[in-house]
C-alpha cells in the first residue's frame, strides 16, 4: 500500500468513525440502552437480521425493538417471545416468527446460566465468532460453515469489542481488538477489491482475513477501524 492510500484511508476512518455515523446505522439500536445485557441482546438480535438493504434492516429492527418494549433483557428473561413458538409466519426475509422464538429461547438459556453473553463466549473459549456459532448452533441465520465470513456475527463482535467508545461499545474486555476480523459484506468486499486489499474472488473468510491483514498494517492494534475507511471510500466514490 502506498503512503497516499494509507493517508486517505486514515482520513476516511477518522471522518466516519464519529457519533454522527450512528443514527443511520443498525448500531443505533443498542445505543439506546445503558445496561450491558440490554446492549448485548439488542445488538445480537439487530445483527442477526442485518441482511440486505440498510433501510429495510432499520425498519425491521425498529419493529423488533417495539416488540421488546424498550426492555431487551426482560423480553428474553420473562419469556415474552414464547407466543411465537412454531409460528410459521414471515418475520423478515427468510426468517419466520418461529425463528425469532428459537433465538430468543437460546438467549434465555445463556442468560440463565451466565452473567452475560461475554461470559458465555469466554466459557466456550477460542475465537468469539466460533464461540457464538457453537452457542447458537442450529438457529436459523447462524452460519455453520467455517468458510463463511460470518459478516453479521463478526459485526456484532466488533460492536462489543472495539474500545474507542465512539461507535462501538468496547464492553467485552476479555477480547482483543487487534484480533478482530473485518465484517465483510458485499459492499466492503467490493471496495476492498478496488483498493487492492484482497485478490480473492469470493467474499469468504479468507478474503476477510486478507483485508483485515492489509488494514492491520495501518492500525495494528485496531484493524477494524478500517471498516469506517472502506465505508468512507464507498461514500466518496459515489459523490
Image (tube, grey):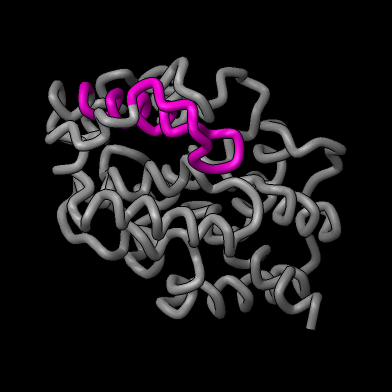
Magenta range is: 85-109
Q: Is residue 104 magenta?
A: yes
User: In the displayed structure, does residue 38 sit left or right of residue 121?
Assistant: left
Front-lying residue, 6 or 59: 59
User: Taking 234 as reference, is 88 left or right?
Assistant: left
Question: Quadrant where the N terminus lies?
Answer: bottom right
Q: Nearer the viewer, residue 235 or 165?
A: 235
Quadrant of residue 103 in the image?
top left
Using the rendered image of the protein, determine whether residue 239 is visible from the camera's viewpoint.
yes
Vertical arrangement, residue 155 with respect to residue 32, above or below: above
Q: What residue is at 49 percent from the left and 61 percent from the top?
A: 58
Measured as percent of width and height from the top left, residue 168 is found at 38, 59
Q: Looking at the image, can residue 180 be seen?
A: no
Relative side of 119 to 52, left or right: left
Residue 63: give x, y in percent of width and height.
39, 55
Q: Which of 182/68 is in front? A: 68
Q: Is residue 189 above or below residue 163?
A: above
* Position of residue 10 measured from the top left corner of the image (x, y, whole percent): 61, 72
In the rendered image, residue 134 lying in the magenta stretch gets the answer no
* Above or below 205: residue 74: below
Name which quarter of the figure residue 176 lies in: top left
Image quadrant in which you'd find residue 78: top left
Up-down: is 230 above or below 170? Answer: below
Where's the C terminus, which quadrant?
bottom right
x and y percentages locating residue 124 in the rendered image: 31, 18
Q: Residue at x 80, y 45 (%)?
A: 198
Amino acid at each position: 500500500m502506498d503512503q497516499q492510500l494509507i493517508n486517505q484511508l486514515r482520513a476516511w476512518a477518522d471522518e466516519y468513525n464519529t457519533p454522527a455515523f450512528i443514527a443511520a446505522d443498525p448500531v443505533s439500536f443498542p445505543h439506546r440502552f445503558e445496561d450491558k445485557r440490554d446492549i448485548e441482546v439488542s445488538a445480537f438480535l439487530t445483527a442477526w437480521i442485518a441482511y440486505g438493504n440498510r433501510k429495510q434492516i432499520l425498519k425491521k429492527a425498529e419493529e423488533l425493538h417495539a416488540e421488546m418494549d424498550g426492555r431487551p433483557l426482560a423480553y428474553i428473561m420473562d419469556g415474552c417471545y414464547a407466543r411465537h413458538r412454531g409460528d410459521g409466519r414471515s418475520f423478515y426475509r427468510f426468517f419466520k416468527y418461529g425463528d425469532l422464538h428459537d433465538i430468543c429461547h437460546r438467549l434465555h438459556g445463556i442468560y440463565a446460566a451466565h452473567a452475560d453473553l461475554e461470559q458465555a463466549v469466554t466459557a466456550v473459549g477460542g475465537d468469539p465468532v466460533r464461540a457464538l456459532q457453537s452457542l447458537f448452533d442450529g438457529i436459523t441465520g447462524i452460519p455453520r460453515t467455517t468458510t463463511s465470513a460470518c459478516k453479521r456475527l463478526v459485526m456484532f463482535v466488533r460492536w462489543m469489542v472495539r474500545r474507542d467508545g465512539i461507535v462501538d461499545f468496547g464492553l467485552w474486555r476479555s477480547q482483543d481488538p487487534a484480533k478482530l476480523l473485518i465484517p465483510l459484506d458485499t459492499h466492503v468486499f467490493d471496495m476492498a477489491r478496488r483498493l487492492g486489499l484482497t485478490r480473492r474472488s469470493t467474499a469468504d473468510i479468507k478474503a476477510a482475513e486478507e483485508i483485515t491483514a492489509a488494514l492491520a498494517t495501518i492500525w495494528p492494534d485496531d484493524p477494524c477501524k478500517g471498516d469506517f475507511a472502506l465505508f468512507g471510500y464507498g461514500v466518496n466514490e459515489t459523490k
